[in-house]
Amino acid sequence: MCRGTFSLVVLIIASAGAGAGCGVPPGGEPSPPTTMMPPSALPPDELRPPGKDEPLDVAAPSRPAPPARAHVPPADPPPGRRATLLGVSVDRRRALLKLEQQPEHWVDPMYRWVDIATQRVVEEWREPALSSVPLETLRDGGGVLREPDTTGDALEADIAQHATALLEAGAPFEPRFGVARDASVLNLGDWLYMVDTRTGKVGDRLAKDASYYPHVSDDGSFFVYARHQGRLDGIHGNYMPFVAPLPAGAPSRKLNVRDIDGWKMTLSRDGRHLYVQSGHELPDGGCLVRVAIAPPSPVTKLYCVEPDERIRDLVFSPSRHLAVVTIGHADVNDRASRAVWIELPDGRVAGELRQATIFDVASVDDSGVGLASGVPEMRAMARLDPRKRRIIRYESDVWVPYSFYGAAWIDADRWVQAEGGGTRTVDLTSLPQTAMPWP
C-alpha cells in the first residue's frame, strides 16, 4: 500500500499493480513536459555548427568561458526541510518551491516564492488541510478504503491558494492539479474532483474508477486524464485517456488508446490533438500516439520502438510542434540509448542520436535544439542540434535534471534548480564549452 498525505507531488513511486488503492499513479520515472527550453534557446553564433561547406570531422577546441555573473547564495531552508523547484513565475523572476521534511515526503509540506536574482523569500505558506487528505481511497484488491472529506473552509482555502500559485507559475503540469482560471481538476486520493479555482470549493467526483493526471487545454475549455480500465494481463493495470469539458457537465468520453503513461502526455496548443505514450506497462515496445480530440477521435501511431526497446522519456517543445523520444532497452543490462526527434502533428522523423551509454534529452526548443544529460559521456551536459548535426558540450558539475524535472528555463541560456531553501542559476554562457560533430 502507498501511504502519505496529499501535496504538490514531486516524486511518483511506480506501482506494479493497477494503481487502485494507491493515490500515487502508476508509471515510470517522473518527466513533466512543461518546463521546456524557450524558442529562443539557441547556441550563440560563434558556437553554432558550421555550414555545409565547413568540416565536421574535427571537434572545435574548448573556448574560454565568458565572465560569470555574481553568485548569490541560495535562501536558507527551514530546519529539516529540503526544497524542490515546482516552477517559475510567468515573468521568470520568482521560483515556486516546495519544502519537504526529511525524510518524510508529503507530510506537512511548506511552499515559498523566492526572488531568483536576490534569493529573497517573497512569500511562504503551508497547506495543512490539503496535505492531510489521504493518498489512498481505493483498496489494492478493489473496493473503497475511505472517502475523503471534501468539505470545510480550511480545505477550500488551501485549494484556492494552491491553484493561485500554479496560475502565477503559468499553470505548469502538476500531476495532481489541472488548473484553469475558473474551474480546475484536483486529484484527491485515487479520484479526480472538480473544484472552483477561486473559492476552492470541491464539486463532483468524475468517476468511480481510479483516475489521475489531469491535463487542461490552453483555453481552459476541456481536460484529459488517465483512468483505470481493467488489467492488461491479469496483473498490470490498463490506463486509458478520457476527455471531458470544463466546467464538467457532460460525461467523460474515452479515447481509444490502451496502456498509456498519463504523465507523459500533452495537448497540442490548438487543442485539436492529444499526444501520449502507449505500451507503457508491458515489455512489448511502445509508441508515440496522436489522438484527435473531436469525435470520433481517430488514433494514429506516429512512432513505435522495437519490441526489445522501451520509451524512457518523452518531451515536447513549447509550441508542441516537436517531440523527442528517448529510448532504452527492455534489458536493463543493455545501456545503449537513442533519441528520436519527431515533427508534430504528422510524425516525420527529424533526427536521431545514438550512444552506447544511457543519456536523456531533458528539453527541446521549437527549432529542435535540445539540452541533454549524459552526452557525450556520463554526467556531461550538452546542447544537441540534430539539424546541424552538432553537439556543444559544457563542462560543469551540475547534473541536468531528468526531463528537466525540478528545473526551469528563465531565458535562452539560463536555468534554475532548487538549492538549499532557494535556487541555483546555471548560466550556460559562463561554462567552458566545446563544439563537436554528431556521432
Image (cartoon, helix red, strand yellow):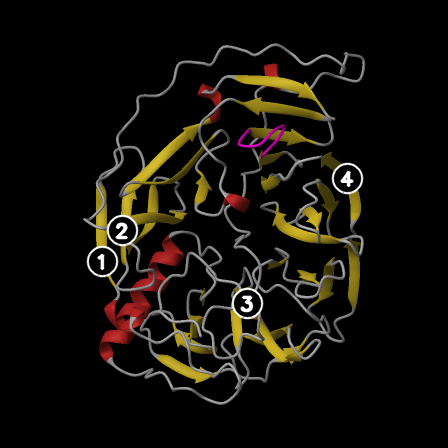
Quadrant into which the C terminus falls: top right
Tell me the magenta residue range.
374-380
Residue topped by disc 2 = 112
Q: Amino acid at mark 4?
A: Ala
User: Residue at image x 56%, y 63%?
Assistant: 217
SS type, badge 2: strand
Badge 3 crowding class, 10 Å Cα cut-off, few under 14, some 14 to 19, many 20 or more, is: many
- For residue 167, above or below residue 122: below
Q: In 3D space, how far apart are the residues under numbered discs 1 and 3 (Cα atoms)? A: 29 Å
Q: In 3D space, how far apart are the residues under numbered discs 4 and 2 (Cα atoms)? A: 40 Å
Residue topped by disc 3 = 26
Residue that protrudes farthest toward the bottom in the picture: 143
- Mark closest to the chain's N terminus, 1 or 2: 2
Q: Quadrant of residue 292?
A: bottom right
Q: Amino acid at mark 2?
A: Arg
- Name the main secondary structure of what is drawn in magenta: loop
Residue that protrudes farthest toward the left in the picture: 79
- Mark closest to the chain's N terminus, 1 or 3: 3
Quadrant into which the N terminus falls: bottom left
Q: In 3D space, how far apart are the residues under numbered discs 1 and 2 (Cα atoms)? A: 6 Å
Q: In 3D space, how far apart are the residues under numbered discs 4 and 1 (Cα atoms)? A: 45 Å
Residue topped by disc 4 = 350
User: Residue at image x 59%, y 17%?
Assistant: 434
Q: Is residue 140 magenta?
A: no
Residue topped by disc 1 = 125
